[in-house]
Image (tube, helix red, strand yellow):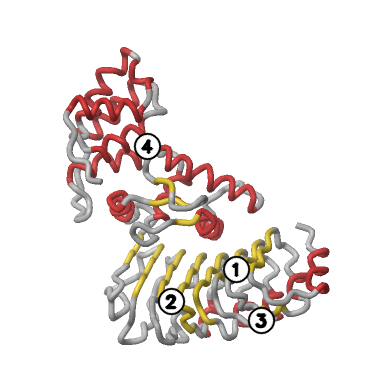
Amino acid sequence: MEVGTLYEEEAWILFRLKVGNSVDDPSLLGIAKEVAKECKGLPLALIIVAGALKKHKTKRSWNCALEQLRGAETISIPEVPTELYKPLRLSYDYLGSNGAKYLFLLCSLFEEDSDICAEELLGYGRGLRIFPGIENLEQARDRVCLLLEILKDGFLLSQGSYKNYVKMHDVVRAMAISSASEGEHNFMVSHHVNSEEFPRRTSYEHFSHMSIVANKFDELPTPIVCRKLKLLMLKLCFKKPFKLQDNFFNDMGELNVLSVSGYVNSILPFPASIKRLSSLRTLCLSNLRLDDISIIGELVTLEILSIRDSQLEELPMEIGKLTNLIMLELRNKNKELERISAGVLSSLVQLEELYMVGVEYCSYSTLRELESLPR
């Protein structure tokens, strides 16, 4: 339902509703009304600025916000109306927590209007080490929930269609992608579903995070030099088998997180160069046909391995080499996984969490292996 620009009185009512009765303080009331006016009657701007300021009780904080709204330079972003940029940027700047900012930026890597799973953010965050001082997965999950509540409380995210999912407004997402090009992060987001070639650029050297969605490539993507790349998300919407070149990962030695998803069990033979990912901590695979995943056993730094809705007959014995693994997730609705090789689970001595959904056959001896896992 489209909501047009509000009259000044309506705008103030909405703003006060979202910011709370703290603005009734005589020392804040006047400046709060000025801040509301700077939102130009735009509902999204009013709500987001109110979310950013509702926990700030001092006149100095409100003065700083007013100065930012009036004086900040507006950056032109095609998807963001000019009058919305300053309010959105203020809300991002007022987050304070670097963890909240990083998690907010990660949400912009997902497709527009998609439901974003908190568990997926947990895996990415753990791989990227954005939770300092966290000792185990349960504590990291609590931190993710807290940060998502902060972002929802500030109206930068909204509740998703399901429990433990969030959504990001398309205008907010466009601002986030723009903000992610500043400072230590540099994002490349290419979600042109009908693209017929790998996103062409003269250089990929400066990107730290890349998210690519494509329907087909007329030519196989050649190796790309991404020495600073920390996270790569690939969604390959191909209805026919697809193979990355064997040397595709050669120049991604700093990669911490890799997520590959397909379309109705797309076949994905692993390129040999995946063995060169010596810093990889999180690997997520979904909707793929995985004929042989023994090569994953070479990724000894791996901490989280998630395989969802993929054709996989056996979890091979090589997976037992992943002695740093803290989470193993095997979720297949169609019971595609037939067996787990003996000795695999008992070798994963650091394992904290194990999920097995849709395993066709699990022997008593396999279950007994769990007794040797102390964590």
Amino acid type indicated by mark 3: Glu
Label disc, if present, on residue 94 of the rendered structure: 4
Lower position in the chain sequence, tag 4 or tag 1: 4
Q: Which residue is mark 1?
A: 331
Is residue 150 found left or right of 280 in the rendered image?
left
Amino acid type indicated by mark 4: Tyr
Vertical relation: 370 (above or below) 319:
above
Q: Quadrant of residue 333?
A: bottom right
Q: Nearer the viewer, mark 2 or mark 4?
A: 2
- Contact between marks 2 and 3 (CB within 8 A): the answer is no
Q: What x and y, as percent, mark residue 64? A: 29, 29
Vertical relation: 156 (above or below) 373:
above
Lower position in the chain sequence, tag 1 or tag 3: 3
Which residue is at 49% across, 74% downward?
A: 287
Q: CA distance from mark 1 to mark 2?
A: 16 Å
Q: Nearer the viewer, residue 135 or 169?
A: 169
